Amino acid sequence: MSAAASVPPSGVPVLSALLDRRSTAALVEPGPDAAEVELLLQAAATAPDHGRLRPWRLVVIDGDARARFADALEDGGLSRTPELSNGIRQKLRAKAFVAPTLIAVVAAPRPAKVERWEQVASAACTAYAMVLAAHGLGLGAMWKSVPFRTGPLLADLLDMEPDDELLGWVLVGTPADPSATVGRGAAELAGIAFRLDDEGRLLPH
Ligand SMILES: Cc1cc2nc3c(=O)[nH]c(=O)nc-3n(C[C@H](O)[C@H](O)[C@H](O)COP(=O)(O)O)c2cc1C
């Protein structure tokens, strides 16, 4: 591709969404309405999916249900580290209340010829699709996670099988301060993008 082509073309909505999106951590009411939640889920369900296995489960959590999710996050933390301090327990609980709506993403690999890692990758794409879709709807969003992938209460709450994994959740709401984002600046390609030349050498893109 020529250098000129690396300038983001304007007027291409999908490219604008990809290039302009920034995560927003501080999200307040109003959250997405029912039609918007439906669109986010529809977007998630377009994730690339080898074998059409739909190896994921998406769980919308809002309103008072967030307290149940807070219980499950605390329980998950305790399952991993039984001697968690009260402060850390409260921090885990607080994660459930930082946005009006959370959509949890569970990778649910199916017994199939498609490798497990492909199925987990597919599930991860659903989260990115929702973050992008939220941006397209003019909402703020951010993908969040915890350093454990299940626990008895989480498994129960999210209907997880033993091989399932919580890949985190997407926060959705209205940015408290539209100018405050936590993401990167312009995409920096140095060190991550290369070109394979015809002699088998990797060259910086
Ligand atoms: C699987 C996954 C989990 C993440 N979990 C967190 C998290 O718990 N806390 C956090 O600050 N950022 C987390 N991030 C990163 C943010 O979602 C976001 O990508 C980052 O802040 C950069 O912002 P940007 O997406 O606008 O470039 C996570 C990203 C991924 C892919």
Image (tube, rainbow, N blue to C red):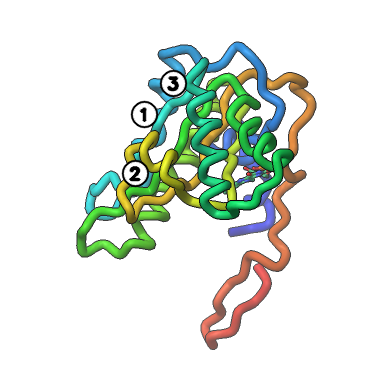
Tell me if I can see residue 136 in this picture.
yes
Residue at the extreme front: 83
Residue tagged 3? 37
Question: Residue at horizontal 68%, vertical 34%?
Answer: 90
Which element carries disc 1, helix, strand or loop? helix
In the picture, the disc for residue 120 is none
C-alpha gap between disc 1 and disc 2: 21 Å
* Sequence-first tag of 1 and 3: 3
Query: Quadrant location of the C terminus?
Result: bottom right
* Residue type, mark 1 in image: Gln
Determine contact: label 1, label 2, CB under 8 Å. Answer: no
* Sequence-first tag of 2 and 3: 3
For the residue pair 6 and 83, the one nearer the viewer reads as 83
The answer as to whether callout 2 falls within 8 Å of ligand 1 is: no
Crowd class of label 2 (few under 14; some 14 to 19; many from 20; radius 10 Å): many
* Residue type, mark 3 in image: Val
Residue 135 in the image: state x and y as whole percent.
58, 28
* Residue type, mark 2 in image: Met
Q: Is residue 165 left or right of residue 144?
A: left
Question: Residue at horizontal 72%, vertical 64%?
Answer: 190
Question: Residue at horizontal 38%, vertical 42%?
Answer: 155
Residue tagged 1? 42
